[in-house]
Amino acid sequence: MARGDQIYAMRQLMGLAGVYEHHGIDCGDGTVIHYRKLQEAVISRTDYRAFAQGTAVFTRHQPVAFIPDVVIERAESRLGERRYDLLTNNCEHFATWCKTGRSESAQLTNFGWHLDRFKTPELRQTINQVAQGNASKTSLELIQSALGNIAIAQQTIAPQSQQAQREIETWHRVAQLAVKQGRDDLARAALHRKVAAKRQQADLQSQLDQLLDLQTTLQNNQQLTQS
């Protein structure tokens, strides 16, 4: 590990050790700039031991990255920031942005947490609470609350997806009938509506898939916490 490296240590989630990576930027002087989680997450410069918390530290190698001076400058420019969000601005988003200029989190992709396009404030707040492990005694309640919010979202989106599918089929039949009647103008209009319905249905189905991924993740965590 060297100055300007993107580094990470394994952290626990809801009492389970080694569940996720906590990322930061190595300043090369025994300090690390990272999202420090106290009562409120804030980007801070801490000593190396506070970052590692007694665990091994690894380097995340990026194929294309800024030179160390630029990486440190970018990290220092955000000291004091208090805008942590698990889904859009977590510790890995921050460290990867410092290193490469891209605000990305490979962990979210690996965990199946793809909710950037489905923004339910209550659900996002609960997920952040669970991820930060604010209160181990209430972790099960938080998970259950998140699962409840997911169920409500699914109940809202599923009928919309089914309706969009019915519209696809309806406009397809309308287009076929218009062609038989020699009404190319109506056929084109119907096909245009069919394409719009297909796009809507694809977007709704994608949201349902994302919610199912998150539901599975939370249910697995719930089982682990109870065991």
Image (tube, rainbow, N blue to C red):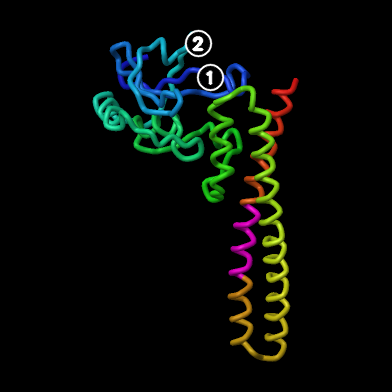
Q: Residue at x 64, y 61 (%)?
A: 201
Quarter residue 5 falls in: top left
Of the image marks 2 and 1, the number of the one nearer the N terminus:
1
Side (left or right) of 174 relative to 83: right
Q: Which mark is residue 122?
A: none
Q: Amino acid at mark 1?
A: Arg
Q: Quadrant of the C terminus?
A: top right
Q: Residues within 10 Å of mark 1 (few under 14, many from 20)?
A: some
Q: Main secondary structure of the magenta part?
A: helix
Q: Position of residue 40 (x, y in %)?
A: 44, 29
Quarter residue 33 falls in: top left
Q: Residue at x 41, y 13 (%)?
A: 50
Read off the residue under disc 2. Answer: 55
Q: Quadrant of the N terminus?
A: top left
Q: Residue at x 43, y 28 (%)?
A: 41
Q: Is residue 200 magenta?
A: yes
| Stretch of the chain drawn in magenta | 195-206
Q: Is residue 177 above or below residue 78?
A: below
Q: Amino acid at mark 2?
A: Thr
Read off the residue under disc 1. Answer: 11
